[in-house]
Image (spheres, rainbow, N blue to C red):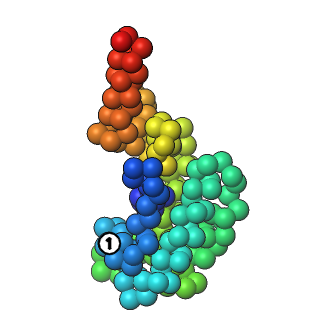
């Protein structure tokens, strides 16, 4: 989920696109992740944009201060269900608009604690996307082989054609 939030900005034909420019993009992102906030989209968008900047700052190696500030708005409370005695965790936030942003920020902390060596930025120089490399041998380089990987292959092919001709 953390990468899904970080990747709500991307480049298309050299232009930066932001999924959250429109409130419908916020609504879709919340729905895709089963998160609340549909009733206060503008406030949720502000929190998501803030969390996204914090995630990208950590991913870009700029330090954890912004992410820690986002994480300071919530926590998880372990509980036991009364119906079946099964454990679960409830997200507790100081303001409901922080819920989705906090969950995504906490997800990045989880990923970084489990597999930091598998967190990668797409190798395409014009791409701004991040991903978790879950390939068996850990050699994935592209956010998407169909998009950036293919563009790199086409670029190398065209370069070879120019130098050969």
Estimate the x, y position of residue 139 in percent, counting from the top left.
43, 29
Q: Residue furthest top?
A: 164
Report the number of discs.
Answer: 1
The reply to whether residue 135 is visible in this rendering is no
Write the residue at 68% across / 58% down: 64
Label 1: which secondary element? helix
Does residue 68 appear left or right of residue 27 in this picture?
A: right
Answer above or below: position of 85 versus 151. Answer: below
Image quarter in which the C terminus is found: top left
Q: Residue furthest front?
A: 165
Q: Nearer the viewer, residue 143 or 101?
A: 143
Estimate the x, y position of residue 42 in percent, counting from the top left.
47, 84
Estimate the x, y position of residue 138 in percent, counting from the top left.
43, 31
Q: Residues within 10 Å of mark 1 (few under 14, many from 20)?
A: some
Write the residue at 58% across / 84% down: 94
Does residue 84 appear left or right of residue 57 in this picture?
A: left
Answer above or below: position of 100 versus 161. Answer: below
Write the residue at 49% across / 49% down: 128
Write the residue at 48% across / 77% down: 45
Q: In which image quadrant can residue 63 be found? A: bottom right
Q: Residue furthest bottom?
A: 39
Q: Nearer the viewer, residue 155 or 131?
A: 155
**Residue behind mark 1:** 28
The reply to whether residue 158 is visible in this rendering is yes
Image quarter in which the N terminus is found: bottom left
């Amino acid at each position: 989920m953390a990468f899904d939030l970080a990747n709500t900005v991307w480049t298309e034909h050299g232009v930066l696109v932001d999924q959250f420019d429109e409130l419908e993009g916020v609504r879709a992102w919340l729905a895709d992740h089963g998160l609340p906030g549909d009733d206060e989209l503008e406030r949720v968008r502000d929190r998501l944009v803030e969390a996204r900047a914090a995630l990208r700052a950590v991913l870009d190696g700029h330090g954890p201060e912004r992410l820690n500030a986002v994480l300071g708005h919530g926590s998880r409370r372990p509980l036991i269900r009364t119906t079946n005695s099964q454990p679960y965790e409830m997200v507790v936030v100081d303001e409901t608009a922080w819920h989705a942003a906090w969950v995504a920020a906490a997800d990045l902390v989880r990923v970084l604690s489990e597999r930091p060596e598998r967190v990668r930025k797409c190798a395409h120089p014009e791409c701004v996307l991040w991903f978790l490399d879950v390939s068996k041998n850990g050699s994935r380089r592209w956010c998407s082989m169909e998009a950036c990987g293919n563009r790199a292959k086409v670029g190398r092919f065209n370069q070879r054609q120019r130098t050969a001709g």
